[in-house]
Image (spheres, rainbow, N blue to C red):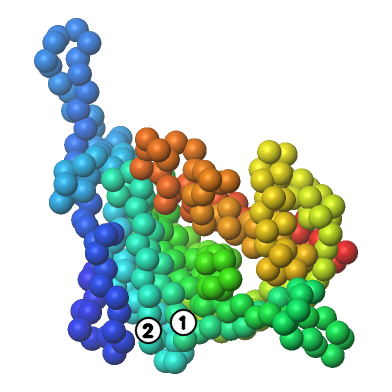
Amino acid sequence: MLDVVNMNSYSTQWPEFSDCNFQAKHAGLLFADDQVIGRLHNVPETECKAIYRTDTNQFLGTSGNRYGIADNAALNDQVIQALEESLPRSYLEKIELKEETSSNGAFCKWTYTFPNAAEPIRQLRNATGYRSDVYGKQHKETWLNFQVSIVNSFSGKTPVICKAGSVDVSCLNSLTTSYYDTSKQRHTSSLDITRFGEFLEQQANSYRDKISIWQRWADKSIDSEQANAALIEAGISPRLTKQLMDRFEVEATKRGKSIWALASSLTYWGTHNSELFTVRGSKTRDNVAASLDARQNKVTRVLSSSAWQMLEAA
């Protein structure tokens, strides 16, 4: 288990860590005897163990004998330490925290947003009131804040994941869009989360380079036919492609018909449990946070696919 870092040693005021701040532990498993009613047998812990949360005694999952539980509080402290050591001091003010869980906490995700790391994106739109550049194209800016997310699970299947990217905080549509690079480590007894520090430092240093890439997307005009073809080529189902194209038309009214508008359609799907993009089973199951995270991972793959690269080069 990770060692807890002394929070009082931090020079930055970090938001309170609460919803994901619980402990999980291993316990032995039992199974019923088919022949004798009421007789139970132990499952050898060398084969399989249960994982439960200690504050509610709720079952979270099972694991093999080499699975190491990464405590959320200790994990959060280590990540904060890495962020304090790797991010520019100017980023570490007015920090925001969002915590999400699924399946009683078997899936946990928390996200730090850094408003002081905001960078603008000029969006195309041929409409009155938008600023024209030297080429006669009209623009309106949106702002992207630097963002870091941590994903931890106690299902026995998912690694600890650190993600870095951005969130679109445009007030035009209250849309949250995220683009992530990820660094993963497996749940083993040798789990060393301090290795995320190098990853986070690299991501902070390359943030403006990524802004430049996204700006090129915003400057690149495409038509609906090109957008639809790119989604199909990227392996997205016809049904979801139709829904994303409906969203693309909405985004285009605010951002112009551009690669950026198509990316925003994808990231809207990745971050919203909406009428158009309802998470399957969400009315009866505690699965929204995990399902949206899975969507975001798919968006990341689409945005780095050969189909997307072909769209950029067209």
- Could you tell me if the residues under marks 1 and 2 are in contact, i.e. CB atoms within 8 Å? yes
Label 2 sits on a secondary structure element that is loop
The image shows residue 283 at horizontal and vertical percentages of 40, 38
Dividing the picture into quarters, in which one does residue 262 lie? bottom right
Q: Which residue is mark 1?
A: 115
Front residue of 252/67: it is 252
184 with respect to 54 (left or right) = right
Give me the residue at 29% from left, 54% from top.
Answer: 69
Number of marks drawn? 2
Q: Which residue is mark 2?
A: 94
Q: What is the number of the mark on residue 143? A: none
The image shows residue 288 at horizontal and vertical percentages of 43, 47
- Above or below 266: residue 115: below
The image shows residue 23 at horizontal and vertical percentages of 21, 56
Q: Say which quadrant the C terminus sits in.
A: bottom right
Front residue of 295/220: it is 220
Q: Residues within 10 Å of mark 1 (few under 14, many from 20)?
A: many
233 with respect to 300 (left or right) = right
- Above or below 254: residue 276: above
Alpha carbon separation for disc pair 1 and 2:
7 Å
Instruction: Inspect the image, locate mark 1, and give the three-letter code of the amino acid beneath it.
Output: Pro
Instruction: Inspect the image, locate mark 2, and give the three-letter code of the amino acid beneath it.
Output: Lys
The image shows residue 39 at horizontal and vertical percentages of 12, 16
Front residue of 288/33: it is 288
Give me the residue at 36% from left, 71% from top.
Answer: 97
Dividing the picture into quarters, in which one does residue 75 lie? bottom left
Q: In this orientation, does residue 67 appear?
A: no
